[in-house]
Structures are given as C-alpha cells and as structure tokens.
Image (spheres, helix red, strand yellow):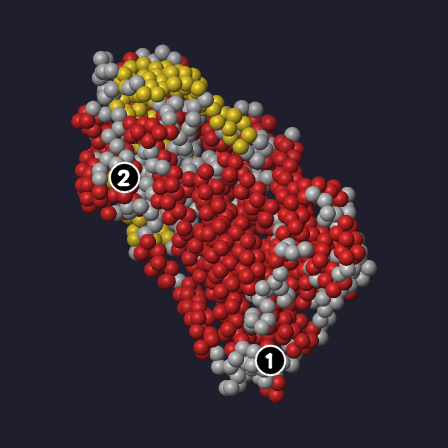
Amino acid sequence: MRVFRFLARRLLYSLVVLLGVLVVVFALVHLVPGDPVRIALGTRYSPEAYQALRSASGLDRPIVEQFVGYVGLALSGNLGVSFRNGEPVTVTLLDRLPATLSLAAAAIVIALLISVPAGTWAALHQGRASDAIVRVATQFGVSIPDFWMGILLIELFATTLRWLPTSGYAPLIGDPTGWLRHVTLPGSTVGLVAAAIMTRYIRSAVLDVASMGYVHTARSKGLPPRVVTIRHILRNALIPVLTITGIQLATILGGVIVVEVVFAWPGLGRLVYTAVAARDYSLIQGAVLLIATLFLLINLIVDVLYSVADPRIRLS
Amino acid sequence: MTVDTYDRRASWRLALRNPLTLISAVILAVIVLAALTADRIAPYGVNKIDVPNALQPPSGAHLFGTDELGRDIFSRVLVGTHASLEVAAASVTFAFFVGVTLGAVAGYRGGWLDTVLMRVIDVMFAFPVLLLALAIVAVLSPGSTTTILAIGIVYTPIFARVARASTLSVRIEPFVAVSRTLGTGNVLILRRHILPNIASPVIVQTSLSLAFAILSEAALSFLGLGLQPPEPSWGRMLFDAQGFVHLAWWMSVFPGLAIFVTALAFNLLGDGLRDVLDPKQRTLLDARRKR
Amino acid sequence: MRKVALSSRDLRVRIGAREILRGISLEVEHGQTLGIVGESGSGKSMTVLAATGLLDAPGAEVTGSSVLMGEAGSAPVQLVGASGRVLRTVHGGRIGFVFQDPGTSLNPLLTLERQISESLEAHRGLTRRSARARALELLDAVGLPDPADRLNNYPHQLSGGQRQRVMIAIALACDPELLIADEPTTALDVTTQAQIIELVRQLQRDFGAAVVWVSHDLGVIGQVADSVTVLHNGEAVEQAPVLDVFDRPQHPYTRELLEASPRIDGDVAPPHEDAPVLLKVSGLDVRYSVTGPVGSTVVHAVRDLSFEIRRATTLGLVGESSSGKSTVAAALTGLVKPHAGTASLAGTDVFTVRRADERALRRRISLVMQDPFASLDPRARVGAAVAEPLYVHQLAKGKRQRRERVAELLELVGLPADFASRYPHELSGGQRQRVSIARALAVQPELLILDESTASLDVSAQANILDLLSQLQLDHNLTYLFITHNLAVVRRMSHDVMVMRVGAVVEYRPAAELFAAPEQDYTRALLAAVPPARPRASADPR
C-alpha cells in the first residue's frame, strides 16, 4: 500500500533526525567549557559530592559508551536526575508537560481562528483595502516582541480592567473555567504572534492556489463563487495550511519559554529557563529532548494527515 | 525563484517607489545613525544612578522618563540600540556566510555532501529557535559573545536552506546546463551563474533574519541570559520594568517600542525587497507557455 | 440552413491605456467549427475569453457585443457586460470550455466523477446519483477506457491525453450549444493530438455543437476548421472559409504564416552519400532513478541505441515525449553518464574521457536547448554569455579580442553587434535563440546538437531560425543532430532520420526514403497524425 510505504519512509526519516537530536542533546553537556559537575555543584562542592554526582551522571565512562547508555536510558524513560535538586528529570518534565501542552493548544486554536479567515480573506481580496489592512497588521504582529505584548496585555486586562488574573495557572482537567481564565492572556500573547505568521503564509498559499489552472476551469463551469472558493481554492490550500500549522506548533513549543516566565505559567518553558539559569544540565538535556521529540511527533502526525488529504500520495 | 526579468537599475527604483519600503529604509538609517553616535549624543550616562529623580515621567529633561534607579531611559535606549544592532549584525553575518556557503555548495554538488547537510539542517530545525539558543547559552555562559554565537548558530540553518533551495532551482535551469556542456568549470559556474541568481532570496532572508535577531536578542536579554548588565539592553530593561508597569508606563513602553520599531523596519524592508527582487515566476511561466 | 450560435461584433479589450483587442467580429454556426489562428501575443485567447465573458484580467475593459444566439427554447444572451449571475448560467451550461494544459486544469484533489458532476448539479439540478450516471456516459463518449473504474480516479492517475478527454467530457456535460477549445492539443503528443481532434469532430457530429478552436498551429486549424479567423496584433486580418485561406490567402500576414509553416510534404534535403562519419554511437544505454514521496523507480530512458552522423549532414532525431531523445543529447554532452555504450567523435571516445581531456572534448560538441527564456542567464549580458566559452577555452585572449569575436558571432547569426550590451529580457524569443546559437558556435564545434531549439518559438520565428541553421550548415559545413517532435521540421532539416520510441530505435533511414515509404507501423502512425499541409476536403456534409 502506497500510504504505508510513504509513512514508513517518513517514520524512518524521523528516527534518523531523532538520533541526530539525541547526539546534539548529549553533546550539550560535554561541550561545556570547564567541568559541568563542578559548575552544577557550585558552592555545594566537596570531593565526595563531586564523585557521587559524577558517577551518578555516568560522566566517568568513555564517550561512546556514555552516549549509548544515554540513549538506552532515554528510550526507557530515564533521563537522569536534576543536578539541582536530585529529582528524577522524567518526573519533573511530565509534571510540567500538561501546562505547556494546554497553553500551546490554546495558542494554536486562537491562531487558527484568526489566521485562516484573515489569510483567506486577504488573498481573495488581493490589492484591495482589506488586503492592505491584513498585510500591515501581520507585519506588526510579526515584529512585536511577545514578552512586551504580554506585559502590556497584563497591564491592560489584568491590572487596569481587572477582567483577568495577572498570572498563575489552573489545570485544564480539574478546573476548566479557572484554566480558561488563566490561559486567556498568555494564550493570546502566543496565539496572536503565531496568527500573524500564519496569516501571511496562508494568504500566500491561497494566492498561489487561486492562480492555478483548475480554478479557472471551475469558474468556466459557471459554478457559484462560494463553491469555487471552498471546494477548489480552500480545499487545495488545506495542505499548505496543514504544513504551517505543524511548523507553528513546533515554534510555539519553543516560544512559550518567555511567555511562561512573564505569566508565571508552570510549564516546560519556565522550567528550561530556571534550569539554564542554574546550569542544571541534566534537566536542560531532558527538556530539550522532550520538546524536540514532540516536534518530530507533530510533524509525523502532519504527514499522516497529508496522506489522508492528498490523493496523489494515497494512490498511484 | 527561477528566471526573472531582471533589470538591475529598474529593480532599485521600483523598490524605493513602494512607500513602506522607503519609510523603513529611512527609519533604519536613523536607527543605525543613532547606534553609531549613541555614546556621543546620549544626554546622560547609561548607568548614572539618580535615585531622587527615580520614576519620573517623560519631560524636557528626560525624554523617555527615568527608571526606578533614576537612570535616564532615553540614554539607555539609545546605547541599547548600539548593543542590539551589533549583536544582530554580527550574528546574522555569521549565519549568512556559513549558511549560504554550505547551502550553495551542497545544493550545487549534491550527493552525500548534500544529504548530510540536509540531515543536519533537519536536526537543527527540530529544536525551536529560542530553545536551542538557550541551550547554547547554558553551555557557554551568558555574555554578548555567547549571544552572538547562539543566535548565529541557530539562524545558520535557515540561510543554508534558502541558499540550497534556490541553488537547486537555478542549477536545473538550462543556462547552467549549457555552461556545463561548454566546458565551464564548477567554480566559475557557481561564481558567475549561481550566486548572482540566488542573491535575491538570500538578501530578503537577510533582512528578515535581522528582524528576528533583534527579537531573539531581546528575548534572551529579557531572561537575563543575553547581554549582561551593566551593558544596557532593551530586553533587560523590559524585564526590570515588569514590577513598575502600572506606576511608570514609560519604563516598559519605550524600550518595547524600540525593539518593535527596529524589527518592524527590517521586516518591511525585507518584504519590500521581496516584492521587487522576486517577481512571481508565474507570470513568466505564463508568458513562456503562450507560444 | 445557417444557424448562428455565437455572434460577436467589434470586440475591444483595453487594459489601462493599451488596446489589446481592436474591434474583432466573428461568427460561428451550429455544427461548424471556427478556427482562430495567430502567433503569441496576437490576442487569440483573449478574444475567446472576451467573447464569452470569461475574461477576468484585472483592469481589463471589454466593449462591443457578443451574443449567444440560443437554440429553440433559449433566448439570446448578450455576454459582454453581462452580470455575474447571467454569465454563471451560461458558462458550463450553454458554453463549454477546454483549456490548454491538462496538467493543471483539473483539480488534483477531486475525483473525476466529482469534477464532471459539479457542472451537472449546478446547471441541471441533478442529484448525485443521476449525475454519476451521466458522468459515466460522458467518460464513455470521450473514449476513456474502463469508464466505470475511472470515475473514482484522480487526475494524476491519468495521462495527458486522457486528462484532455476528461476536460472535454466536463465541457460537454450539460450539452452546451458552444464549445470553446483554447489550444487544447498544444501540450499533447502528435498522435494523441490526432486522437483528440478526431474525438472532437465526432462529438460535434453527434451533439451538433458549434466549436471555436484556437491554435497557433495552422496545420491543426486546417484539419479542424470550417472557417478561419487569422489574428495578428489584436486584429482580425483575414476571415474566410478554410480552403480559401489556404489556397487564396488575401492578407500578407496570412501568406507569411503559410510560408513559414513547415510542411510535411515539403522538400527533403538531398542525401550526402559519401561524407565521412563524424559521430558513431553504439549500444547507448541510459538509466536514471526518479524519487517520489513513496520511493524511487528506475527509468530506462535509452535502450541499446546505435546510430551514425556523417559530416556536414543533419540527423533528425524524432520522438514523442518520453522517447528518450533529449537523454541522447544529455549523454553526448556529458550531462548524464550512460549506463553502457560507446560513442566515438572522429576517433575520440566521448563517454570515457579523462578529467584532463574533458574540457577539450566539450569544445567539440555543442548544445542549443529548447527554452529561449531559460537558456540565457538573466543576469548576464548577451555579450558575456557568448564570450563565456571563449574565455573558458582561451579562444580569444584579452577583453578586446573577445569583444571582437563576439561581434563576429552575433553578426553570423544575424544580430547587430551592439546587442552584446543588452540583457536577455530585452530580446525576443527568436533573438535569444540566435544568441544561444552564437554561443554554441563560439567554440567552433564539430557537432552541434539542437534539442527542440525551435519548439518554443512562434511559427515565423521558427522559420527564420531554421533558415539560419540551414544557411550556416551550407556555409560552414556544420554537422547537426536535430532533435524534435515535429515531423514537418524534421523533414525540412534532415538528411537522415531516426525515429525513437520509449528509448529504442523504431526506424532509422535516409529522410527521403523514410518519408516516402515508412516501414514501421509507429512511423506510419506518426506521419498520419501530422496535420496535412492542406485541409482535408471539409465539404462533406455533417
């Protein structure tokens, strides 16, 4: 089956990239000038603590063996322990993961709700005033620093208008209304910037599709404009929209770092920030690995959706 | 991007006719000028603490007001211009040279070199930009050199990808094939035919990357992991302003505006250049097809 | 009985200050075909789009009148300036359209059934089920094999010719009074073209629609049309029944066009029996792999090919698409490495050449490609392009010598020397091909390969280039490998002809013999498919 072969290839490719990711993540610790163990211990240094941490992290074995060991452990879910507080990295990561996921989800939903209509509208009215407005707005959105926007939004909606809380978190599962209240500002911060990027991409994709021969054919059949727009233009622009959504989701996963800090959102991003500040290398490694893996997973899902949406891949 | 109706002089004239491009070029000129002359024209010292005058709103004496330590925000924003532009320029230059060279050579030669480069780029793209930059900062310790290196490394893949993609499309153009059949060597082809023809998307990418570099440096500095105090940076100023947003709006508005306007100017310039340098090949294809 | 289907009067199209169409009037009758012929830029596509209200170029103003007369039951409709709603009932419902490029004219994500049934739903109000039945009928009527299976296929699963059949099915779905075919066979092979022409003719007989057929190819027009309109620069310079246009052309431009069109029954170059062999190819085999999203396959582009070219003669290499003819050129010029085979150019081995000797070999075989727009670096001036091989092979030392030589070469191909300072986009297609020829001749090659070098040019530009090439061959004793799909051109230029099909030789003989008495069925089919020089007696009653 063609689909099977296509997905198998994509899976294989993802695994190769994953291997590369593992190499990079592994190398991080070993590229630190100076002694990572010593740096992590900082003022708590003592010869015994040093040795203990060193062996616990496996840093006293040859590099290749360390790498293989690392991969083995990682695949089985063991990402070591935090240099800072000794807790298992995996546990800490999984603890923080839901918060980031729910934030990313909220952001992408907001982004899609804005960018798909805006991008399509602008493309279909190319050259007219509405198109110009959208183009200028997206330029603004792409150039604005997200943390600045976050600060300003807090000032406006939380401090001044008091409609929403200034910071904090409530889990989606357990306190949905609380979650909604808390996620609105950070989600909008991330989502609006993502919307700006996606709108431009979607606009360009729809323009490309609208100029294709088959759209001309559809018009020559005398089909109502709505049918032409939906069945011929949008349906074919779906694939590029899928692409940009996948890419943006990955970008969001990395971009939430700053927003989580501004809004005190207890997710992976904030964790990475504190880990970097404290030079907690095993935690940094674990977090980076997790996020990169999530990214690859998202791309793989996008590929699956492609094979459903595009008959050229499904059938020979 | 493939073949376009290229006319060097007309391109630049066309670029400047777009009002947005013109405005952004002027704004950038002003910003660069400010960066270069910052030390001389800043009315106050960057770290001149003057607590009695803390948290003053904008006035004749302090154009952008003062912060919680009484420092003049206008001077700090001005000197911060120098710092930010320097980081942006240096990191993008790094990414440009390394990325374009790798991308063009790999795209032209193909084979295992290309495959390896593609995989490396894919691996680097698997990490979100800021995350990778942070990881690099974690490895090398924060500072301006680290910031430049981090941003530079993180942006190299995009230049490599753009250069590779356009090299690939130029490489299959008939005029390249004909040159090869005439015996022209690879180096000459790269120099004379490939590089000039991939210049357009690469130039556009440079402008856009400068915008992103400004934003990335600001984000890193905001987190305290970019430019380090006492060097003034817009991002760090915003971080410090967080506690005072309600009391002293000028502390968060002006540095933020500085970042925003600079990034916007680079983005608009990039867009304007793209419209001019990269005419839709579609029209040309249509012209070719209508025999 | 004369029944007019479409009557257009004084159609004008203005974009900004420019008038693109200047007062075109035409008429087409039921059951008859109007052929519109012209070169690129003549406005032929624009004419039919304006006449049917389908023109949507931004800023275009259409004036004049174009009335769809209607048959018993339907009222006449003025199409120029009509409202969107009126036009939408007409388009697809009373006028069907077939466009040029089957590759992009069909929505890749919709099944064939859907693409046909959406017209039926929109205009006839049919349910999905009855629409499906009708779609099946239509696919059968256009000669698509296994129509029931095909209904659920997607466009990418069909060949170019099959896709055009589907386009025709779509166009005829609602039984329109008028069928507009805008260059429908231009992108197709000559044999497929013949099939489509025959299909449309038959459908016209069966359904009685009026047909407007637009083409740049006079031969095709001669085959399909009952009356002809010749367009030049937005004006209709001649309008007459087809036989009159061919036998008694009135307008000088029409005469030019007829002269320029290469004729399948034209003169053949005399054979050069005793010229020494310049190039000898033996057992050439080329394969390469193609990678898609699903995996890679190996394409066997050329199989066990052997041929010879004698000095100062032209070998015409003919084939349809995927015949492997361009691959032969690629192999001989070093762009592609052959899997097996040998080639010897006056004693020197072409395929196994040492790196050190490679450059010297490249001097001896030269290539001119098809696309005049893409064969020249858009960022290099004409002079630089022609001088490049001079520089590479040190054929002229120093800037001044190179400049002089470039001037000589440009004059050789009929271009003024001051063209050297121009950029390619300032030149026309024909002029660019001349530059490419000048560049190819700069190295004074022993063998010049012309790979579809005139295929993208207008008929008049093509005629000029062919004249130039013939003249150069006579003056300088040049040897050509002339690759083309156009049999009439081959006939004009070649001393010997080799017909290729799917990578293998079908027939390989002196031109005079091949055209007089083709031996292989495929060759015969190819020749039969070529539109004849004179229209067939189209007086037979339909």
Residue type highlighted by circle 1: Asp
- State which quarter of the image contains the N terminus of chain C: top left
The answer to whether residue B1 of the structure is visible from this angle is yes
Describe the element under mark 1 as helix, strand or loop.
loop
The answer to whether residue A134 of the structure is visible from this angle is no
Q: Is residue B26 above or below residue C53?
A: below
Q: Chain of mark 1?
A: B
The image quarter containing residue C504 is top left
Is C110 or C46 nearer to us in this picture?
A: C110
Mark 2 neighbour class, 10 Å CA radius: few under 14, some 14 to 19, many 20 or more: some
State the residue position of label 2.
C391
Instruction: Decide if residue C475 is on the left or right side of residue A139.
Output: left
Image point (44%, 61%), residue name = B269
Is B181 or A132 nearer to us in this picture?
A: B181
x and y percentages locating residue A145 in the rendered image = 58, 65
- Residues at marks 2 and 1, CA–CA distance in whole angstroms: 66 Å
Disc sitting over residue B67 in the figure: 1
Image point (49%, 57%), residue name = B92
Residue type highlighted by circle 2: Tyr
Instruction: Decide if residue C249 is on the left or right side of residue B76.
Output: left
The image quarter containing residue C482 is top left
Q: Point out the residue furthest to the front here.
A: A47
Q: Are marks 2 and 1 on the same chain?
A: no
Q: Is residue B106 above or below residue C157?
A: below
